[in-house]
Image: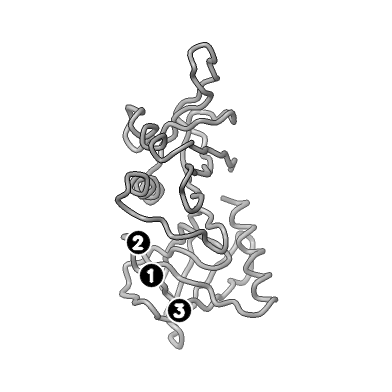
Amino acid sequence: MRRIRCHYPSGDAFLEALATTRESNALEVYTTERFEPGEEVLVELYYTGLAAKMMVRAVGMRWHNARPRLRVRAGGELRCTGSEWRKVEFLRAVAAGEAELPGRRRSLRHPVIVEVAWRRVGEPDLTACTITELSENGALITTSAGLEVGDEVIVEIRTPGSARALEVLSVVRNRDHPAGVGVEFMARDIGGIHRLREVIRRIVEES
């Protein structure tokens, strides 16, 4: 999946890009990197004053070349759905002064869709779920189970072609997301960190 960058000069410019499009769940982007209708891309969204960049998975709708005489920049429209559109809506709230984005994360979270499983520490029963954001420090797990902040769980992540799942001790850090919970990975030794990074690399390449 290709990654494109879209930076806006200000929060107001980002709000204008959202208001310009006539489609629902769509965003006007400015980039010289051409994308095709229906093409799935990763978009790096940022505007001046934002505390951190945000990665969003989107689908191309239309793209156009720059038209300097008309003062039209190269770009087009992208559409997001589900949790990816909620990220865009959150950035809209930040730009409008209705919400605040925390400082830069220690590592970049990749938007992915990966089937995994988790279980509580000391319990054998696994619960199937999906990861929609993933980094070497944590993940967003979509589950309706009654997990509370501070609960310790084992997350089992299996990469394509792997015979054995990677088990990662994790701690629930927040329940702010409507679709699930945020967990922090507790890989403390160098070997565990390297294995986790390799698994993430393979998952992102396959996405």
Give the residue at mark 3: 153
Numbered marks: total: 3
Does label 2 or label 3 sit earlier along the sequence?
3
Mark 3 is surrounded, within 10 Å at the Cα level, by few (under 14), some (14 to 19) or many (20 or more) other residues, namely many
C-alpha separation, residue under disc 2 versus residue under disc 3:
18 Å
**Which amino acid is tagged 3?**
Val
Mark 1 is surrounded, within 10 Å at the Cα level, by few (under 14), some (14 to 19) or many (20 or more) other residues, namely some
Give the residue at mark 1: 174
Q: Position of residue 146 (x, y in %)?
A: 31, 75
Q: Are marks 1 and 2 in contact (CB under 8 Å)?
A: yes
C-alpha separation, residue under disc 1 versus residue under disc 2:
8 Å
| In the foreground, 146 or 182 | 182
Does label 1 or label 3 sit earlier along the sequence?
3
Give the residue at mark 2: 177
Q: Position of residue 180 (x, y in %)?
A: 36, 64
| In the foreground, 203 or 27 | 27
Q: Position of residue 75 (x, y in %)?
A: 51, 27
| In the foreground, 66 or 133 | 66
Q: Which mark is residue 30?
A: none
Q: Residue at x 52, y 37 (%)?
A: 6
Task: Identify the element where label 1 is drawn.
Answer: strand
**Which amino acid is tagged 1?**
Asn
Task: Identify the element where label 2 is drawn.
Answer: loop
Q: Residue at x 52, y 34 (%)?
A: 39
